[in-house]
Amino acid sequence: MVGIRRRRKSSASSDELIITTSSTSSKSSAILTDPLMSRPRISYARRKKADTKLMVWLEIFAAIAGIFVIYFTYYHFDLFHYHLTHHFAHHWDDPSAQHLLGHKLLANRRNTSGAFHWFRRSADKGNPHSAYNLAAGHLSGYKTDVKKGEVRELLKFAAKNGVSEAKTLFLELCRDKPNKHCDH
């Protein structure tokens, strides 16, 4: 008899896993001498290691921060929306956010120069409502960076892109009295 050893991932010793073959018959028959091979193999779950103290503190901090953000957005929504809009306007250079930020700054005349700064940036990117607001602010007497003759172009651009107030203002002021309003 010839003994062949097989490797297995188990805690059984290698002496128990000897497969014997008989050389007397023409067919090679293998006889297992391992008593554990007849039973089904069961995999047991491994025990999870306990979290370190640092991970526990990080989880507690994340939970507290989440509760704070929920509280802040619920009870101070206007301030939260202002900061969110400012983030999109400044970092992502989004024309819609820039226009909305201009409106937020113009409300209650809180920061008119900042409002027209954001209207200018949004109008330069092609927002027709910001172009109208920039021209209307200049015509209303606010300090803006509108150059001479630019009011006509801003109103024409806004009117072409569907701002009805710009169409009215363009027809009433720039066509009827161009020297007084649109060319200064």
Image: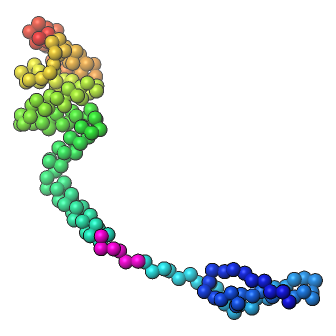
* Residue 100 placement (x, y as % from top left): 20, 36
| Visual colour scheme | rainbow
Q: Main secondary structure of the magenta part?
A: loop
Q: Nearer the viewer, residue 39 or 47?
A: 47
Q: Is residue 114 above or below residue 11?
A: above
| Magenta residues, start to end | 49-54
153 sits left or right of 172 in the view: right
Looking at the image, can residue 166 be seen? yes
* Residue 167 placement (x, y as % from top left): 20, 18
117 sits left or right of 157 in the view: left
Q: Residue at x 84, y 86 (%)?
A: 2
Q: The C terminus lies in which quarter of the figure?
A: top left
* Residue 5 placement (x, y as % from top left): 75, 83
* Residue 83 placement (x, y as % from top left): 19, 45
165 sits left or right of 111 in the view: right
Q: Is residue 52 magenta?
A: yes
